[in-house]
Amino acid sequence: MTALDAAAALVLSLPADRRILIGIAGAPGAGKSTFAGRLAAETAGTVLPMDGFHLPQARLVELGRRDRMGAADTFDVSGFVTLLHALRTGARVTAPGFDRTVEEPVADAITIEPADRILLIEGNYLLHSPEVAPLLDATIFVRLDDAIRHARLVARHIAFGKTPEEARAWALGTDERNAEIIAPGAERADLVLDLD
């Protein structure tokens, strides 16, 4: 059974009479977004990234956290928890998206309709915050070989404007420190999958 098959089996085993929220967590560059998209195609799900809950750049500068954007305390966790509660009602909900070109959240960029029954919520810290995991019906933790993950992160950072030197420093610095914080979440996941 492939990782995608295992994840789809988990999702489709859950009650179909209400909206279900599936968390997909993992380290930066592990492939969460790509995997969530593939799983959405298999299960008729809708992907909702946690990235929209990055604090705005100006706020990160005020807090002295801009140089480690992506760390757990650079997200609006209370806003994210409020969104999860709203999603649980089954109502129409709007959520922020994230523009990687300017590294800023975009208000109301994503709309979840009442007909959207399977929500695949992907983000680094879904298994890190004690407030978040209880609001999810099931959680999946994805892992990827570190060398591949690092190479993908460097390429991503270059694609969005960093020099190769800056990209490597960020991938092996800030991103890797975040990965170390995220890793213990695998022990709390309902399903752990190794991607390739």
Image (cartoon, rainbow, N blue to C red):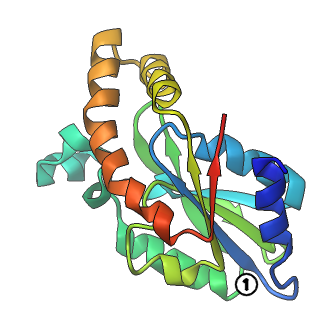
Q: Is residue 187 visible?
A: yes
Q: Position of residue 73 (x, y in %)?
A: 26, 60
Horizontal relation, residue 49 to residue 37: left or right: left
Q: Amino acid at mark 1?
A: Gly
Tell me if residue 51 comes above or below residue 46 in the rendering.
above
Please state which of residues 191 and 80 is positioned toward the viewer in this rendering.
191
Q: Position of residue 144 (x, y in %)?
A: 55, 38
Q: Is residue 116 visible?
A: no
Q: Mark 1 — residue?
A: 90
User: Dot 1: what SS?
Assistant: loop
Please state which of residues 37 and 161 is positioned toward the viewer in this rendering.
37
Q: Position of residue 122 (x, y in %)?
A: 58, 57
Q: Locate the C terminus and report the quarter of the image it occupies.
A: top right
Tell me if residue 175 comes above or below residue 37 in the rendering.
above
The residue depicted at 17 percent of the width and 48 percent of the height is 65
Q: Position of residue 34 (x, y in %)?
A: 68, 40
Please state which of residues 137 and 162 is positioned toward the viewer in this rendering.
137
